Amino acid sequence: MTDTTSMTQASGGGLSAQKLGLIAVAVLLAGLIAVPVAVGDEFVYHIFITICLFAALSTAWNIVGGYAGQLSLGHAIFYGIGGYAGVILVNLGISPWFGMFAGAAVAVVAAIVVSWPCFRLHGPFFALATIAFLEVFRVLALHFRELTGGATGLMIQLNIGWEWMVFRERLPALLIAFGMLLVCLAVAWAIRSHRLGFYLVATRERESAAKAAGVGTVKVRLMAVSISAALSAMVGTFHAMYLTFIEPESMFSLQFSIQIAMFALIGGIGTVWGPLLGAVLLVPITEFARGALGSEAIGLHGFVYGVVLMLVVLFLPNGIMGVVHRFTSGSEKTEGEQAAPVAAAPRSAVPHEAGREVMRVEGLQKHFGGLHVTNDVGFTLREGEILGVIGPNGAGKTTVFNMLSGFLKPDEGRVSVLSPSGEWQEPATPADFATLGVGRTFQIVQPFAAMTVEENIMVGAFHRHPHVGDAREAARETAHRMGLGPYLNAEAASLTIGGLKRLEVARVMAMEPRILLLDEVMAGINQTDVRRAVDLMLSIRDTGVSIIAIEHVMQAVMSLSDRVIVINSGQIIAQGDPQEVVRDEHVIEAYLGKEFTHA
């Protein structure tokens, strides 16, 4: 659970603990100014300026590396751009207060150009790509000597005063560094507390599930990296003024990029205050060691970072903030074997009548190499209808679902959805399908494990309710309807498999869909949960939502479905009334083998 999440909990004990946590943060921030002023030593001033600078840079990096989960090891690109922009403009007579915004603008453009292709990469490949781009910028800085000074570097014109960010005393520099830290913390907190932060964490945890909830995953990542790059560049401008001299090896340094990430990893990646705690812990240790040992301490900071990181990985896998959460989070309810009852309406004895058509599927064809996965699949779905899709394993059912929700593009054929305005449209992407009111679950449950139950459902609710307060209210209402009310503050990872499946349905229902695609939501759960799920699906159907359900639990298919489609070897072999379909000899052959058709 994130620190921002904990702060929003409403339990009495938890709330007082969070107040204590906020007081502790306020005291820590005040100490960054009070301690050096009280000591009055120049070296102590330097240490606290360095703490503020590294904490600000790490906080900016955390927006991409923590919230969005993109491990950028080339973040010094943006820091270097800011530094060079500030120095070049200062030498032209332009104040760094303006130069920092120019550097931020250039950094944003560079961030988009660099990140757009890199976001196609995952895991270590993204990190390696950012390192490669960092090296490119370093070489460019060496090459354009007239602009950057090349390997000899650039010295700033020593104009003293606030206008130029150059001072004889250390206190003004500390105030500026502290102010930048506050700005970075405020931006990080604002992002995590609003829809963008929820979307970033959801994208980090389960990109497919985020797309199904209507999240533009590439768009939100680009927003995150743009904000992060702008903040890093602004801090880089001030740091260049503080150093009074810059050169490519230090401004575009891989070691520097790793240091920035290291503070967040040690403090608590993906949290608002983790980077600050990491910098407060590590910077004084290394700087005092350097001051005490002098030239003998060259490279010591790398050793210190390595030792601390090793200890954190072994004993504090969630960083310092993981320990803090143990004391600030109140006891949370987790789901046991007996789930809470679901408020579902019993099925009426009156036959259900479906309304107008809301989806048309025509001639879907899909090949994976030489394998013909779907062959001329076509059907219609009506308003308020439950359409069951059955078939043996490997029949192509999930491939059909992926084409019905935009995750796969059919080689031939089309999927048309009736829009709320009454026009037929052919959506192409998951976001397009979500906009038209098509929501889906996944065969393998995809919760946002690091988020609470409430936050998971809020990701879906944001689709219709952009404001946090409205989304939270909608999420809580949905959770109570789905029997998840007692577990709102529990992490999703603590739920049983039945609870996780209900959570996924709840997340989709919070989107207020018109068409619900359920991919084996009853697989692997006990009979009690199956009966509960059947009642829940019927209550959803009775609100006018159309449902297409892939299921292997025949008891559920028979009691749920108004119509059934049977898919085998990628094509529809039977469809119609459930009782008639299961007696079809082709269906029996597909499930049990040819020898059973005349049994």
Image (cartoon, rainbow, N blue to C red):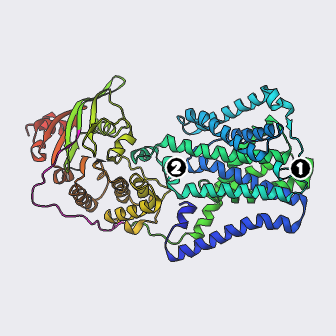
Give whichever of discs 1 and 2 has the lower sequence position.
1
Q: Mark 2 packing: few (<14 Cα in 10 Å), some, or many (20+)? A: many
Q: What residue do we see at 89% from left, 54% from top?
A: 291
Q: How far from the left and from the top, in percent, is residue 532?
A: 26, 61
- Residue at the spot 68% in from the left edge and 51% down from the top edge: 58
214 or 394, nearer to the observer: 214
Residue holding disc 2:
200
Judged left or right of residue 386, residue 104 is right
Position of 283 compared to 598: left or right? right
On residue 160, the disc is 1
> Could one spot residue 301 in this view of the protein?
yes
Instruction: Tell me if residue 413 comes above or below residue 518 in the rendering.
Output: above
**Amino acid type of the residue that numbered disc 2 sits on in the rendered structure:** Leu
Q: Residues within 10 Å of mark 1 (few under 14, many from 20)?
A: few
Residue 350 belongs to the span the image colors magenta: yes
Q: Front-most of 37 and 147?
A: 147
Q: What x and y, as percent, mark residue 94?
A: 79, 41
Q: How many marks?
A: 2
Could you say which quadrant of the image residue 14 lies in? bottom right
Res. 86 image quadrant:
top right
Q: Which residues are magenta?
A: 337-359
Residue drawn at (82%, 67%), measured in percent from left and top? Answer: 35
- Point out the image quarter for the C terminus: top left
